[in-house]
Amino acid sequence: MKNPNATVTSINEFNALASSVTTIVVDNGVSDPEFTELDLTRFTQLKSLVIGRHSFAYVETVNITGLSELESVEIDTRSFSMWDIFHTDPNRHFYLKNCPSLRELKIGYSSFSEYSVFEIENVNALESIEMGGWQFAYASLELKGILLSQRVMTRPALSQITHLW
């Protein structure tokens, strides 16, 4: 089912986005075997990122770094995944760093299930991390430079969680 609020319905549309956009809503099922890196650093005014279900299956590296205006990231079910929850791929990495306004990170069920690296660093406004299960199933969660004393995080106990600061 398509998302009527989507601003991006294909990889070509994503690549054509102006760097000044403030909101990106990716439709369900947007993927391409040739598109293997999602680097959002050019979107310097981005405030909200929403990614639909079953999107970006072939992406090996997600880089959300240095976005000072970013406030929320929401990734729906089974995105950034080949749906093989029983294996990890050492070449698949997720980085969320230096986004000082980010308050909310939501990741749906079975997204990033084969990723081996999950790093969150210097996102000090972060108030909540919500995960639906089976994402980053075999990766360590590294939280660097984050004060969690007033934060809420939910994640199934399957994965190891490492605090480094």
Image (cartoon, rainbow, N blue to C red):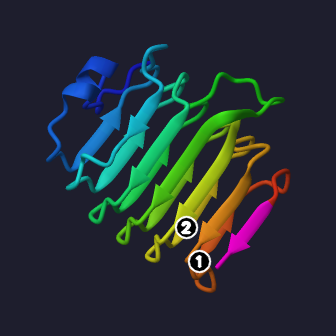
Dot 1: element: loop
Identify the residue shown where x is 34% and y is 60%: 66
State the quadrant of the C terminus. Answer: bottom right
Left/right placement of residue 63 relative to residue 49 reads: right
Above or below residue 40? Residue 147 is: below
Give the amino acid type for the residue marked by disc 1 in the picture: Arg
> Residue 112 in the image: x percent, y percent?
63, 37
Viewer can see residue 10 = no
Name the residue carrying label 1: 151
Magenta span: 161-165
Q: Residue furthest bottom?
A: 149
Vertical arrangement, residue 156 with respect to residue 143, above or below: above
Residue 135 lies, in percent from the top left, at: 69, 42
Judge whether 83 appears above or below 102 on screen.
above
**Crowd band around label 2 with a 10 angstrom C-alpha radius: few (<14), some (14–19), many (20+):** some
**Which residue matches tag 2?**
128
- The residue at the far top in this view is 33
